[in-house]
């Protein structure tokens, strides 16, 4: 039996405006940086932000699976899907969280940063997501419902493990495809980012989705939540490992590099 | 400002009764699953490699994903089938779980073997098309017999499963091949997780426009666009996975064997 969402949840008007303005401000900052990079010839940031905005279309589907309900009286609802109302701050949040962090990942890889930087981006994404979601929840704009595990203050922590895995996956993919993402082809990012998002959630969040929608003992839901968190970490580890392999391939090695020189994750 | 309180449509799932005894499907899919496991066991013993068995066991685990995509794709199974488990308010029939073994397990293993030999992308396209056609055949039989049904609106109700089953064995095969090339001996048993990752990754990454349109109040033209986009994404996954396998094989062998 699917748990019934708190359909009568009401968002405080001031809180809804506050959170919307907060997200607009963060998105504006991310857009400013992306546009500055675009002025220097790197369009990837702009299209990554656009891809993040498009990926927000998937949010309602995941909210249904992961049991999250946005109050229907939030300001500036952009679209309805899966019987849910998606406010503007969700759409912008996707832009700066998934789009911008994916671009930061690609940007870092392009500058030769290695696995330590990727894990740092994942960790920062984890904390950033927690801070942002805690703020919105504390204001009363949305509510996680059902038998959520790892839920100390209304934010189920298994989500925090899954969300930052997407920008690592997408950023890594854009880095590997970078030579093919010039000119009009850069627009492929707008399609690829939602695909990566769907693939990431599909691949690693299915244990908790199934458990939340089944008649199972509480401990099974907790095990499913732990499995989802473990899958997330394994997923990121595999991507980091794959990118290291990609950087070590013979054609990526500088011809005259001295044998003792430190080996960057990505050849310049 | 007026607000709308929308209640999730949990009650639009029809109750279905099969027109035939679904034991027919159980026997048919059961025989295919047993045969697949037998082939996998023989291959595993002969090659001293557990990968074929791991792929088939992984396919059974992967069947846990079924109710997620039945819910998203609006598919319901007859209530009078032998049930393997229940989730998302759906009774998942045992025959369907067994059907994962040949389509998701053994076929993906065969694809991985072909990729290791440097198979031409054209043959992988043909395999994907074959997987698609075989699922269309099974889906047609099941729908005609009312063993299961798609209750979404056309045209998207016809895209629920078959198109996504074209890329699944190709992507799953690619992951088995690439990850498997880095593991030796019994450590290759870890690849049991690959089918449980590959299938939902394909379904969610290619199917999301269709799922979104199926669960939204959108005009017909948007439904058609969502359907075309899902088909295009399925084709793109096949093409990219085939190209990646080819590139990987060329990197390792310097050319097809």
Image: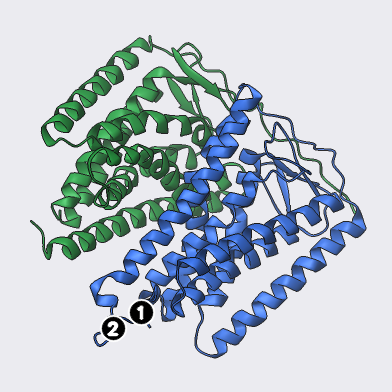
As drawn, the residue found furthest toward the left would be B257
Q: Residue at x 39, y 55 (%)?
A: B232
Q: Earlier in the sequence, mark 1 or mark 2?
A: 2
Q: Report which colour depicts chain A.
A: blue
Q: Residue at x 53, y 56 (%)?
A: A165
Q: Report which colour depicts chain B.
A: green
> As displayed, is residue A43 above or below residue B210?
below
As drawn, the residue found furthest toward the bottom would be A40
Whole-percent x and y of residue B26?
Answer: 34, 15
Instruction: Tell me if I can see residue B217 in this picture.
Output: no
Dot 1: what SS? loop
Q: Nearer the viewer, residue A186 or A166?
A: A166
> Which chain is mark 2 on?
A
Q: Quadrant of residue B133?
A: top left
Relative to A33, is A205 on the left or the right?
left
Q: Are marks 1 and 2 on the same chain?
A: yes
- Marks 1 and 2, how far apart in space? 7 Å
The answer to whether mark 1 and mark 2 are in CB contact below 8 A is yes
Q: Residue at x 81, y 68 (%)?
A: A21
Label 2 neighbour load within 10 Å: few <14, some 14-19, many 20+: few
Whole-percent x and y of residue B182?
Answer: 27, 52
Instruction: Give the labeled residue for mark 2.
Output: A254
Q: Nearer the viewer, residue A239 or B5?
A: A239
Relative to A250, is A129 on the left or the right?
right
Relative to B237, is A191 on the left or the right?
right
> Which chain is mark 1 on?
A
Instruction: Tell me if I can see residue B192 in this picture.
Output: yes
Instruction: Give the labeled residue for mark 1.
Output: A267
Label 1 neighbour load within 10 Å: few <14, some 14-19, many 20+: some
């Amino acid at each position: 039996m699917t748990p019934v969402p708190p359909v009568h949840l009401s968002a405080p008007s001031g809180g809804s405006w506050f959170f919307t303005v907060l997200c607009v401000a963060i998105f504006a900052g991310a857009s400013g940086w992306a546009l500055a990079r675009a002025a220097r010839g790197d369009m990837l940031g702009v299209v990554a932000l656009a891809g993040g905005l498009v990926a927000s279309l998937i949010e309602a589907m995941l909210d249904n699976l992961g049991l999250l309900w946005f109050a229907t009286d939030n300001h500036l609802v952009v679209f309805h899907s899966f019987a849910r109302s998606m406010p503007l701050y969700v759409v912008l949040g996707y832009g700066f969280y998934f789009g911008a962090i994916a671009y930061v990942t690609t940007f870092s890889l392009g500058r030769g940063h290695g696995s330590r930087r990727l894990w740092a981006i994942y960790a920062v994404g984890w904390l950033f997501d927690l801070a942002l979601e805690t703020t919105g929840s504390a204001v009363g704009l949305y509510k996680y419902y059902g038998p959520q595990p790892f839920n100390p203050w209304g934010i189920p922590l298994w989500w925090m493990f899954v969300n930052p895995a997407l920008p690592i996956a997408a950023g890594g993919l854009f880095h590997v495809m970078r030579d093919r993402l010039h000119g009009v082809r850069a627009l492929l990012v707008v399609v690829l980012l939602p695909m990566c998002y769907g693939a990431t959630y599909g691949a690693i969040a299915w244990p908790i989705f199934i458990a939340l929608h089944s008649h199972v003992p509480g401990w099974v839901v907790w095990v499913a939540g732990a499995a989802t968190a473990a899958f997330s970490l394994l997923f990121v580890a595999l991507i980091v490992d794959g990118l290291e392999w990609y950087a070590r391939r013979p054609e990526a090695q500088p011809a005259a590099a001295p044998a003792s020189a430190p080996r960057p994750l990505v050849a310049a | 400002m007026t607000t709308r309180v929308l209640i999730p449509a949990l009650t639009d799932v029809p109750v279905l009764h099969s027109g035939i005894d679904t034991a027919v499907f159980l026997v048919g899919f059961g025989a295919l699953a047993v045969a697949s496991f037998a082939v996998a066991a023989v291959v595993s013993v002969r090659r001293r490699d557990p990968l074929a068995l791991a792929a088939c066991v992984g396919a059974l685990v992967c069947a846990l994903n079924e109710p997620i995509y039945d819910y998203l794709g609006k598919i319901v199974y007859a209530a009078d089938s032998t049930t393997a488990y229940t989730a998302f308010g759906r009774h998942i029939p045992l025959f369907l779980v067994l059907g994962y073994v040949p389509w998701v397990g053994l076929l993906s293993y065969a694809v991985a073997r072909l990729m290791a030999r440097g198979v031409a992308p054209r043959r992988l396209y043909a395999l994907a098309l074959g997987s698609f056609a075989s699922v269309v055949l099974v889906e047609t039989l099941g729908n005609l017999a009312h063993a299961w049904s798609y209750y979404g609106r056309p045209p998207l109700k016809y895209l629920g499963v078959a198109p996504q089953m074209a890329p699944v064995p190709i992507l799953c095969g690619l992951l088995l091949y690439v990850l498997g090339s880095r593991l030796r001996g019994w450590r290759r048993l870890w690849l049991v997780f690959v089918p449980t990752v590959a299938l939902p990754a394909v379904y969610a990454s290619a199917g999301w426009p269709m799922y979104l349109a199926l669960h939204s109040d959108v005009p017909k033209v948007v439904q058609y666009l969502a359907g075309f986009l899902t088909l295009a994404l399925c084709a793109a996954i096949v093409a990219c996975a085939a190209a990646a396998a080819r590139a990987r094989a060329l990197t390792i062998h310097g050319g097809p064997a």
